[in-house]
Image (cartoon, rainbow, N blue to C red):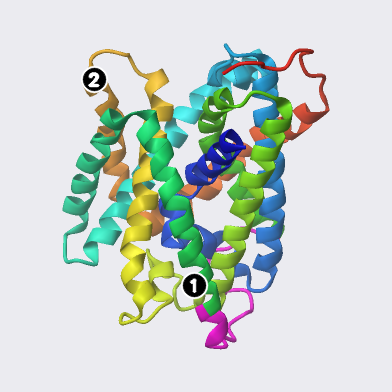
Amino acid sequence: MRRVIFVAVSYVGAVVGAGFGSGREVLQFFAAYGMSGLWGAVWAGGLFALVGAVLLRRVVSLGPDADYSFALRDICGRRLGRAMDLVVFPFLLVALAVVLAGGAALLAAFGIPIALGAALWALALGSATLAGRGALLWSNIAMVPLIFVYSVGAALFARSIGGTALTRSDTPLTVGPWITGATLYVAYNTVLAFAALATLAARLKTRTEAVVAGVAGGLALGFLCLLVTVALLPFHARLSASDLPLAAVFPPQHAFARLYPLCLGAALWTTGAAILVALQPKLPPRPLWWSIVPIVLAYPLAQLGLGGLIQTVYPIMGYAGCPLLVLLILSAFRRLPPAERRSV
């Protein structure tokens, strides 16, 4: 059971990052649709549960030597798997840029210029390459409950003030009907979380554990999306231009408003560290400074700002990730190898 909990929580931590912690992702892909966004959150939770269960189950079944690239080729086929492998690298760089932009937006609230804030956060993330995967796992264990507490508090507060702005936003945030926005959200997060899930499967022994961990993590993600959508619904129209809409839910003097920087900072660090871990197999193992190269490459992108990156780049990433999402779901109907993994 401990293995299942660790993997489920790490699945949540791999998806909940700068975009989610800022509220910007949820605002764009769910809350901007008004009440329909609630159905989008439910749909996304179901897809996340399916993706997690299918991927973890398949990687466990492939054996103890299966890695991220091997799993990608198994699901997509050799040629498309190689093509998707090439796509993942720029995806991860964009996600890292979003982390840096989120860190810059957080520090800007304390009077630090955006460019300097992104640089400071880049230095902080550099330490993640030295922390190791064990530290990343335990940081997820600490961060996910914190995010849950804040999200529940935000949803309850939004309901208590009786917000009425529940119709679809007239801003250019939405990307088609609500089901399109929710599906794109899951699609690009599937690409970003694929490497992390493939690595996490090594902690599981059986297919049953894999299914339970994937479903639990996916449903938790859907519940978080639902909570934050409820929190942002009363404010989504006036917060459409904000980089940190979730920070604006509570008045400045509220206790939860003081908790927010800690929540967002934790989400930024864990996601940034997870991205760097996912990028490491794609870089030369020596010297160590190669691990800093992705941060250097992502820094110029971060200057586009958190809102700009999520509004313009993430929908494109969602469409590009749809083939992987479809093939991953279809792989659930293919025969698995006969033997389950028996040892870790």
Q: Amino acid at mark 2?
A: Leu
**Figure quadrant of the C terminus:** top right
- Is residue 18 rendered to the left or right of residue 193? left
Mark 2 near mark 1, Cβ–Cβ under 8 Å? Answer: no
Q: Residues within 10 Å of mark 2 (few under 14, many from 20)?
A: few
**Figure quadrant of the N terminus:** top right
Residue found 34% across the figure and 67% down from its top: 259
- Which mark is first along the chain, 1 or 2? 1
- Is residue 72 rendered to the left or right of residue 207? left
Residue found 40% across the figure and 52% down from its top: 18
Q: Residue 256 or 315: which is nearer the viewer?
A: 256
Work out whether 97 lies above or below 68.
Answer: below
Residue 172 magenta? yes
Q: Which residue is mark 1?
A: 153
Q: Which residue is mark 2?
A: 288
Residue 232 appearing in the image: no
- Is residue 35 rendered to the left or right of residue 127? right
- Is residue 121 rendered to the left or right of residue 163? left
Residue found 61% across the figure and 26% down from its top: 204
